[in-house]
Amino acid sequence: NTPVTVTNPISVPAGGNAVNYSFTQHVDLSNVYFPTEFKVFVTASQDNNHSNDTLRIMLRKEICESGSTTAASPSIANIKVAGIDNEPLPADWTPFGTSEDVTYTNYANTVAPGVFVKGQSYEMSITNAFPGTSGTKVYKYVFIDYNRNGQWEVTGANAERVLAITNANVFNAQHPENATSFGTFTVPATATEGLTLMRVIGAGTNPAAVTSGCGYYPQGETEDYAVIIRNYRLYAAYW
């Protein structure tokens, strides 16, 4: 982005070593969502050491925490949707004995964003792994921050809980195929265009323990992904 530059000659009083200055030109940071570094620095005609004149600030939208309280529990092994295929599974993969000891994983900065087009429908698959062999039942939820306000609205016309898979079958040695669940959702025309967050929760617990995209639950894993919302007409014209 183009930096905001203020040119204002300031004289340092004789014998002084500090000057206070207040910027009057404002910068609109309301569009910042993911961690973004900002730098504020000054240049002085007779100062050869500029490093001590630079202030670095890391800004991001405040997002609520989520995750399970038990690390050795069902984890999310793979998700597929809108171009995201995180950790593709090999042909001989098994859901048993491969679970990671994690409660929350942030992929927003390491996995390329998925692209959603307003008004379009998408199928999503979520595959879980389990540390033991007896299997379990995992309830799966997906949230997308359609209005980019850093919160998860779960009710109303613009509800952001796009999937709630609570009828998944138990996956065990006899039925390993049940480790994967599928769901379909449509991106509303009212969604705000741009980069935003998708949160995926796989909870090995009663659905009542996951009432929103925030907070903690006894077992499972939460994963965050960056996604891009685009307008249908612009996207069609571009391609």
Image (tube, rainbow, N blue to C red):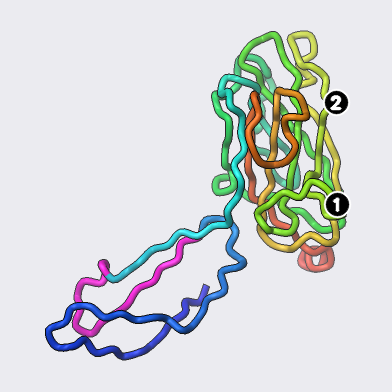
123 or 12, nearer to the observer: 12
Query: Marks 1 and 2, how far apart in space?
Result: 23 Å
Q: Quadrant of residue 73?
A: top right
Residue linked to disc 2: 167
> Circle 2 sits in a helix, a strand or a loop, which is it?
loop
Give the numbered dot on residue 156.
1
Q: Give how far across and how far down residue 155 sits, in percent.
A: 83, 48
90 or 152, nearer to the observer: 152
Q: Is residue 181 left or right of residue 76?
A: right
Give the numbered dot on residue 111.
none
For marks 1 and 2, the one nearer the N-term is: 1
> Circle 1 sits in a helix, a strand or a loop, which is it?
loop
Q: Specify the amino acid type for callout 1.
A: Gly
Where is 209 relative to 185, above or below?
A: above
Q: Alpha-carbon neighbours of circle 1 within 10 Å: few (<14), some, or many (≥20)?
A: few
Q: Residue at x 78, y 44 (%)?
A: 161
Q: Residue furthest left?
A: 15
Does residue 51 belong to the magenta stretch? yes
Where is 182 relative to 72, above or below?
A: below
In magenta, the rendered stretch is: 36-52
Q: Give how far across and how far down residue 137 sits, in percent.
A: 76, 19
Q: Residue at x 76, y 24 (%)?
A: 206
Q: Specify the amino acid type for callout 2.
A: Asn
231 or 163, nearer to the observer: 163
Q: Residue at x 47, y 76 (%)?
A: 3
Does residue 169 belong to the magenta stretch? no
- Mark 1, mark 2: which one is toward the viewer? 1
